[in-house]
Amino acid sequence: MTPKVALLSHSNFGSSRTHSAAKMRTALALLHEMAPDLEVEGEMHGDAAIEEKIRDRIFPHSRLSGMANLLVMPNLDAANISYELLKVLGDGLPIGPLLLGTKKSAHIVTPSVTARGLLNMGALALVDAIDPPALRRSPSIDLLDV
């Protein structure tokens, strides 16, 4: 699967000058510099990330085509709220959350984890232990400092 990355925010393509929106714009600039072939765009609302028609109306020169398949949240609160809502409302199988950006990933389970969820997380941790993702072999970007 080819990543189609949307950096999410309360701001749409520079419509707000808050710290949170600026952080996402800075992250976008870093990603364009470090991975110029990566299909990534932001900062944008969630609906613009999913619906290309909405995104094209707001920002017709977007580098993102189609629906984003990787949503990057501006902070832990937004990420956790979105994850928990999608877990309950969606029909998919949630695996996560994962804490990345450190030398080793952390595989987190919540009190509501099912037996299948625990098994899936254990399998993912095992694969990570055997063959760590290439991301950890790349230069690290700490977006908390951005």
Image (tube, helix red, strand yellow):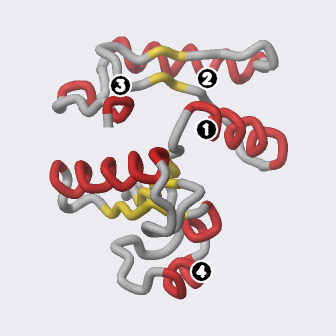
The local secondary structure at tag 3 comes to loop
Q: Give the residue type that dot 2 points to.
A: Asn
Amino acid, disc 1: Ala
Residue placed at 45% from the left, 60% from the top?
Answer: 43
Kindly identify which residue carries mark 2: 120
Say few, some or many: other residues with alpha carbon within 10 Å of mark 3 (under 14 / 14 to 19 / 20 or more).
some
Q: Is residue 15 left or right of residue 61?
A: right
Tags 4 and 2 in contact by the CB under 8 Å rule? no
The residues bearing labels 4 and 1 have C-alpha atoms spaced at a distance of 22 Å
Q: Compared with residue 125, is residue 61 higher up or lower down, i.e. above or below? A: below
* Amino acid residing under circle 3: Gly
Who comes first in sequence, dot 4 or dot 1? Answer: 4
Locate residue 4, reporting x and y percent.
42, 60
Q: CA distance from mark 4 to mark 2?
A: 35 Å
Which image quarter holds the C terminus?
Answer: top left
**Residue 110 image position (x, y, % from top left):** 72, 16
Real-space Cα separation, disc 2 to disc 1, in angstroms: 20 Å
What's the distance in space between the residues labelled 3 and 4, CA to CA? 32 Å
Judged from the image, the secondary structure of the residue bearing numbered disc 2 is: helix
Q: What SS does tag 1 mark?
A: helix
Q: Which mark is residue 54?
A: 4
